[in-house]
Image (tube, helix red, strand yellow):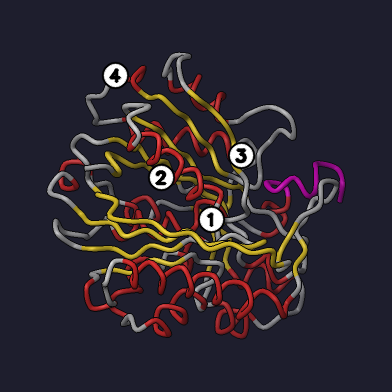
Amino acid sequence: MIGIVSYGFYVPHYRIKVEEIAQMWGRDPQEIKKSLHITEKAVAAADEDAVTMAYQSAAMALDGTSINKEEIGCMFFGSESFPYAVKPAATIVAEWLGIGHHYLAYDTQFACKAGTGALISALAMVGAGKITYGLVCAGDKGTARPQDLLEYTAGSGANAWLVGDKEVILEVIATYSFSSDTPDFWRGIKSDYPSYTGRFTGQPAYFHHVGTAAKNLMAKQALTPNDFAYAVFHMPNGKFPLQVGLSLGFSEKQVTPSLVVNQLGNSYSASSLMGLAAVLDEAKAGDKILFVSYGSGAGSDAFIFQVTRHLKKQRKSLKKQIQQKKYINYPTYLKYMDIIHEGSL
């Protein structure tokens, strides 16, 4: 049995409400909330970035396990906000964790599905008998141009997933990936903020890729929505994942347990996997979970997981961590995002 052995997550302490951003630009916060199904988002502090958050989540994933850290044969890190253009982030996290030096490491990019692509690679290595354990991190410090609609959704956070074949808490039954060249969202090398084409972000991008990956994987496994306890989809906002779930035949009851985007925003590479962590707050042995990520540019990775009895031992509480928060104002938010600096106003 191959799958997830343990997991961890990190949600920054700070939050900013939709109202705080909207009042700066003369927007109606209720209109924003209705459109995006977002009320607030998590904000990484000035001294936090994708690497520090990934370390926190990876440390949680390893805590409570009895594995020898030097048995971790690969360390992969998916993000779209790495602090260095040329210098691996995966090796920094591995060094801080103390896993030794005998491991394969690399960073992955594919917008918001950078983490799930890395997860498939780690699972394949374990399945091929190349390594005993693999560690995969996904995390981002999401930024957006001031006054852009993305400013309400671009959040921060990270999670980590320990892969192996012993005491597995989530068995991976099957995976399926669907990819295309779709220009819905991008950030140039010399750009600080992302750009997007509105008409591509919905049906041709998110809904087409997520829906196609989900349908094909279920068809390959001869399963229907009724066979699943939960369905988890990438969360660019609070509206899209519920909409795509309903269109596939899932009920609100199957989808809503994963929808933490309303409180955290879209943490990019960590977003869909944060939804999976939320479901693990309550999932029971035997439950099947359909999980589908999405990355702009564009592609989706779909997984079918089955919960085992070992989850009870490794279960964490994402809900509890989300509740630990402190609200900040808009100028503080801009400083934490490194958009303004002391003395610049």
- What amino acid type should be assigned to the residue bearing mark 1? Ala
Q: Residue 108 in the image: x percent, y percent?
A: 59, 41
- Marks 2, 1: nearer the viewer: 2
Tell me what residue is drawn at x 34 percent, y 52 percent.
318
Would residue 211 appear left or right of 329 to someone viewing this image?
Answer: left
Q: Which is closer to the viewer, label 4 or label 1? A: 4
Q: Which dot, 4 or 3, sits closer to the camera?
A: 4
Q: Residue furthest top?
A: 101
Residue assigned mark 3: 49
- Going by the image, does 101 lie left or right of 109? left
Part of the protein shown in magenta: 335-345
Residue at horizontal 23 percent and vertical 56 percent from the top: 306
Label 2: how many residues lie within 10 Å, few (<14), some (14-19) or many (20+)?
many
Q: Residue beneath label 2, please?
A: 9
Mark 2 or mark 1: which comes first in sequence?
A: 2
Cα separation between marks 2 and 4: 21 Å
Is 344 in the magenta? yes
Q: Amino acid at mark 3?
A: Asp
In this view, the residue in front, 90 or 258, is 90
Residue at the spot of label 1: 42
Q: Position of residue 334 (x, y in %)?
A: 72, 53
Q: Nearer the viewer, mark 1 or mark 3?
A: 3
Question: Which sits earlier in the primary sequence, circle 4 or circle 1?
Answer: 1
Looking at the image, is 172 positioned above or below residue 130? below
